[in-house]
Image: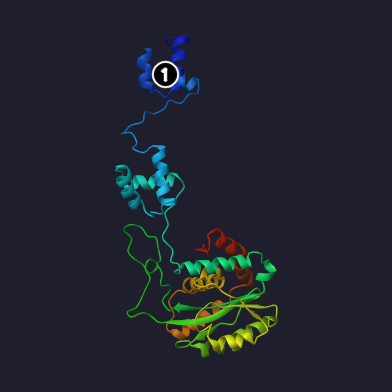
Amino acid sequence: MRQVSERVVNDVKSLLEKGHSTREIASRCGISNATVSRLAKKHEISPKCPVNGRPSLLDERMKARIVRYIVIDKLGTAVRVKKALFEDHSLDISVKTVQRVLRERGLVAIEKPKKPLLTPRHQRLRLEWAKAHQFWTMDDWKRVVWSDETKINRFGSDGRSWAWKRANEQLTRDHVRQVIKHGGGNLMIWSCITWQGVGYVTEITGRMDKEDYLHILKSDLTDTLDFFGLNDSKTVFMQDNDPKHKSKLVMNYLNEQVYEVMEWPPNSPDLNPIENMWNLLKQRLFHDYDAPPKGMGELWDRVYETWYKIDTDTVRRHIESMPKRVDAVLKNNGLWIDY
């Protein structure tokens, strides 16, 4: 093997460190490609592969502009960013390029979650509620009895559902969400949760009015408070602002009770931990059974059985999130939070 002079070795090392290709270095130094590779290995210098293709149209300033379109200007989608780049900077790039830049800068695409409408007034009231409760301790939150109603569909959720299958695999029962023409029916239920566990659950037959709701308060709520020994002045009862809940008939009754009634901000299910219990109930109803219920009676039996199987630790875990929920509302200036 022909010896290579020290000067050539130094030239090869310098060119390698500057990123020149093996072929280019061999030509400039009058040696073989193999010799260049051998010297690179000996001196532990990795040859850099040449960059092919046309130069990028985006410099760092323009990449930052793309992020600003999303974060500051709230354009929302890569398609709208692409259009803005063309209109503002005469820059024509693909939507995929915009998406790649956003991913590189740490942004992720999400499916927009459904959230209740928040007017400026709603936002202000949520923020005021959060400020009023920002210094509550866990001992304070443990006193709250959280109540709500929810709808249970016989054939599962109203939302989207997903499944994986092989490309050529035929559909099986696991791959579809079975429905029947004109729907399969549903039932409405009311219940509450406490630090001690889930409260009494009751089925709401027909369209609930203020008299029906008052009956629930006098029976199921009172039974829950008595069962857990909570019917005293230290208890705080939470209900939302449904017109039935705020009717004069109901409020007159609640004002006569020894327990306190919490003022609740409008359109704020994300602040109520019982919503997490409803989600858990529905998941278990339609994952723990091999087939849908044959009728509404069987659906109610499943609801009744599944609700009372929710353990106290699970309930407490969600109630313990209340300080974080309050803090999130404050940080988001009264807008929606991820609960």
| Residue 250 visible here | yes
Residue at numbered disc 1: 36
In which quadrant of the rendered view does residue 18 lie? Answer: top left
Q: Which residue is more in the foreground, 225 or 300?
A: 225
Residue 206 lies, with reference to residue 324, above or below; the image says below
Q: Which residue is more in the foreground, 311 or 224?
A: 224
In screen coordinates, is 4 left or right of 180?
Answer: right
In the rendered image, which quarter contains the N terminus? Answer: top left
In which quadrant of the rendered view does residue 307 lie? Answer: bottom right
Q: Which residue is more in the foreground, 21 or 291?
A: 21
In screen coordinates, is 217 left or right of 87?
Answer: right
Residue 268 lies, with reference to residue 56, above or below; the image says below
Residue at 47% x, 14% y: name it: 10
Residue 209 lies, with reference to residue 41, above or below; the image says below
In screen coordinates, is 319 left or right of 234?
Answer: left
Q: Count the labels in the image.
A: 1
Identify the amino acid type marked 1.
Val
Residue 313, position as x, y percentages in the image: 63, 69
Residue 211, position as x, y percentages in the image: 52, 90
Give the colour scheme shown. rainbow
Q: Which residue is more in the foreground, 81 or 176?
A: 81
| Residue 308 visible here | no
Residue 225, position as x, y percentages in the image: 65, 82
Residue at 58% x, 73% y: name it: 310
Mark 1 falls on what kind of element? helix
Residue 259, position as x, y percentages in the image: 66, 81
Residue at 50% x, 20% y: name it: 43
Label 1: few (<14), some (14–19) or many (≥20) C-alpha neighbours in 10 Å: many
